[in-house]
Amino acid sequence: QKAVSQMVKQEEKEDLWQGYENCRVGRSISSSIRRYVKGFEKFGYSVHEVYEFINDINKYE
């Protein structure tokens, strides 16, 4: 059970990361995030959480 939920999390992160990469290649970050957030709402993410996630990614770069 735990492994499955971790896999799902990993997949979500990869999707988000892809959205983030799209933002970096010149699209405005908010419109790109908005598009990706739609997909994450079904996982129960809020826009705020998506932004926090992206901020976390920035810390590790």
Image (cartoon, rainbow, N blue to C red):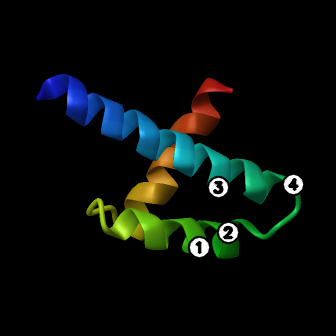
Q: Are marks 2 and 3 in contact (CB under 8 Å)?
A: yes
- Mark 4: which amino acid? Val
Say which residue label 2 marks.
32
Nearer the observer, 7 or 44: 7
Mark 2 to mark 3 CA distance (whole Å): 7 Å
Give the mark nearest the N terminus, 2 or 3.
Answer: 3
Task: Determine whether the residue tagged by mark 1 lies in a helix, strand or loop.
Answer: helix
Mark 2 to mark 4 CA distance (whole Å): 11 Å
Query: Hey, which quadrant is residue 3 in on the image?
Result: top left
Task: Determine whether the residue tagged by mark 2 lies in a helix, strand or loop.
Answer: helix
Give the mark nearest the N terminus, 1 or 3.
Answer: 3
Query: Hey, which quadrant is residue 46 in on the image?
Result: bottom left
Give the mark nearest the N terminus, 4 or 3.
Answer: 3
Mark 1 to mark 2 CA distance (whole Å): 5 Å
Q: Are marks 1 and 3 in contact (CB under 8 Å)?
A: yes
Q: Are marks 2 and 4 in contact (CB under 8 Å)?
A: no
Say which residue label 1 marks.
35
Task: Determine whether the residue tagged by mark 4 lies in a helix, strand or loop.
Answer: loop
Q: Is residue 9 above or below residue 31?
A: above
At which x and y percent is residue 48? 41, 64
- Mark 2: which amino acid? Ser
Say which residue label 4 marks.
25
Q: Are marks 1 and 2 in contact (CB under 8 Å)?
A: yes
Whether residue 47 sits left or right of residue 23 in the image: it is left
Nearer the observer, 32 or 30: 32
Who's the residue at 73% across and 48% down the image? Answer: 21
- Mark 1: which amino acid? Arg
Nearer the observer, 13 or 59: 13
Mark 1 to mark 3 CA distance (whole Å): 8 Å
Give the mark nearest the N terminus, 2 or 4.
Answer: 4
